[in-house]
Amino acid sequence: MTDPQPDAVSRFLDDLATRGHDPLLHGATGTMRLELIDGGDTQRWTITVDKGDLRVSQRNTRPDAVMTMQRSLFEGMVKGRVNATAALLRGVLVVEGDLGLVTAFARLLPGPPRSVTTFLQRQKELADR
């Protein structure tokens, strides 16, 4: 029997762990804990950013910021179906600590599947005028 395919959350976190450096976070430094609630279980991930250099682990360290949410909500974020800012405003995403670090991290989350295409099409339309 083969192992099941990793889910979207696992793929996203694995990708972050192997990314090394991300220029979108060039100005960010700090440690964030991601708490994903799934029924009675809570998974905790530590994401450390040092001027764009990323490290992901499940070590328990003191964070500068904590993001707490249902795992299913985070899955929606990594699939581009849920906006982190909207989730925060609705109160389904709880943030403690350095909001700037959380905002920087949110840049790594994909937008809606059509958002990049739509943006690029709009830029072309503006250029053609």
Image (cartoon, helix red, strand yellow):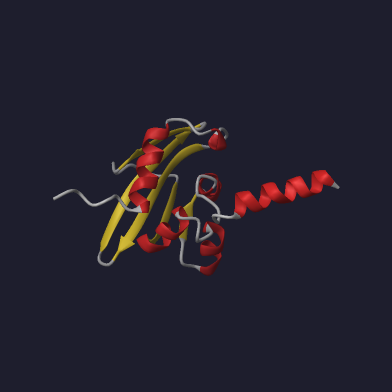
Does 23 sit above or below residue 102?
above
Across and down, in percent, residue 72 comes to 38, 63
Left or right, residue 29 beside residue 118 = left
Kindly identify the residue that appears in the image at 37 percent across and 37 percent down: 17
Residue 127, by quadrant, is top right
Residue 62, by quadrant, is top left
Query: Does the image show residue 62?
Result: no
Across and down, in percent, residue 118 comes to 66, 53
Across and down, in percent, residue 51 comes to 52, 31
Q: Choose between 115 and 82: the one closer to the eye.
A: 115
Q: Choose between 63 and 53: the one closer to the eye.
A: 53
Across and down, in percent, residue 93 comes to 46, 62
Q: Choose between 119 and 63: the one closer to the eye.
A: 119
Kindly identify the residue that appears in the image at 40 percent across and 58 percent down: 75
Does 76 sit above or below residue 104?
below
Kindly identify the residue that appears in the image at 54 percent across and 54 percent down: 113
Q: How many numbered discs?
A: 0
